[in-house]
Amino acid sequence: MPKILKEEKTAIDANDIRKLLLACDIRRLKTYLLLLASGGMRPVEGLAIRICDIDFSVNPTKVHIRAEFAKTRVAREVYISDEATKRLRDWIDWRYRNDRPKCADDLIFHQWNLAEEPNPQTLYPHVAEEFAKLLDVAGFAERKADRTRRHRITLKTFRDFVKSTISDCSGKEFSEWFIGHSGSPYYNRKESLRREKYRTECMKHLTFLDYDVLEARGRSIEANLVEKDSEIRALKERMDRMGDAIMLQQNDMMELNSSMKSIIDDHMWYVKKFGLSEPTLKRIEESLVQIKALPDSKYIPDSD
């Protein structure tokens, strides 16, 4: 059988996600995208989240992924950003406004006006359709060249972004555990350690619209730049001082050579004036050659 041809995945970055979120005016879809972009769950896994699966009592917020909707059929916990937590709280409050009854098993993204029974699989086409319209509005209308003609960016693209970001921040092993791949040693780490690792190392890179966090991150970068500038200035001053010391040493050497030349010239004048034997003159000339051959010698003979 011929091999199935596959196109390279389209990557997105934080700016692309921010652009999509700013263009989204659907409350449910915006909340859902923030969960995908900070929690890295698969699209259906995100739609399968119930009220009872969310633990707001810890920071960052912990979300339980049910085994029956996980691709690997293994349940796991993931974390979401503070930004996504705030949006999720607001969505739940709005969804159960006017004293609507709330049940712990309610799917948080199920629509009241849908005729189907609450089910993540039947909910997915509705959310996917909303997302496709958002892509066109936000300027991401490019589609694949195959017969499906689907958008190059899909809901699963957010999962790829989270995997790459966490891998860059905390290493491949932690990212493999976080998105639910089996075999990672982080399966055996304490939950508190995994949660703290996400909070301190990853969450700031999975935040898109929380401008307080972004501003603090910018201040941190600015402080690092100022520190680097100070180090560069100190290094430059040190190099300048070393250059001045080298110049002084060169001047001292030149003065020493000048004094030696003057002494030698005076000595040769006396030799010529009063006369010396050939062996004596030869020894003097050999000494003069040795002096000129000394390292770093700046001796320059008379032009005459």
Image (spheres, rainbow, N blue to C red):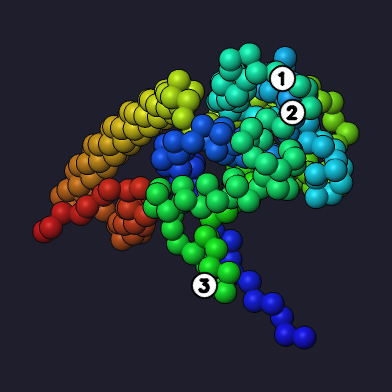
Viewed as shown, does residue 255 lie left or right of 169? left
Q: Find numbered disc 3 in the image and state the secondary structure of the residue it sits on.
A: loop
Q: Say what amino acid the circle numbered 2 marks.
A: Asp
- State how far apart marks 3 and 2 are (Cα): 39 Å
Residue 106 is labelled as 2
Q: Earlier in the sequence, mark 3 or mark 1?
A: 1
- Residue 137: x percent and y percent? 40, 49
The residue that appears at 71% across and 43% down in the rendered structure is: 116
Q: Say what amino acid the circle numbered 3 marks.
A: Ala
Hey, which residue is sitting farthest front in the picture? Answer: 115
| Figure quadrant of the C terminus | bottom left
Q: Say what amino acid the circle numbered 1 marks.
A: Lys
Q: Find numbered disc 1 in the image and state the secondary structure of the residue it sits on.
A: loop
Cβ atoms at labels 3 and 1 below 8 Å apart: no
Cβ atoms at labels 2 and 1 below 8 Å apart: yes
Viewed as shown, does residue 199 lie left or right of 258? right
Viewed as shown, does residue 259 lie left or right of 221? left
- Residue 243: x percent and y percent? 31, 36
Q: Nearer the viewer, residue 48 or 282?
A: 48
- Residue 4: x percent and y percent? 69, 77
The residue that appears at 12% across and 58% down in the rendered structure is: 303
Q: Nearer the viewer, residue 187 or 52?
A: 52
The residue that label 1 is drawn on is 102
The residue that label 3 is drawn on is 145
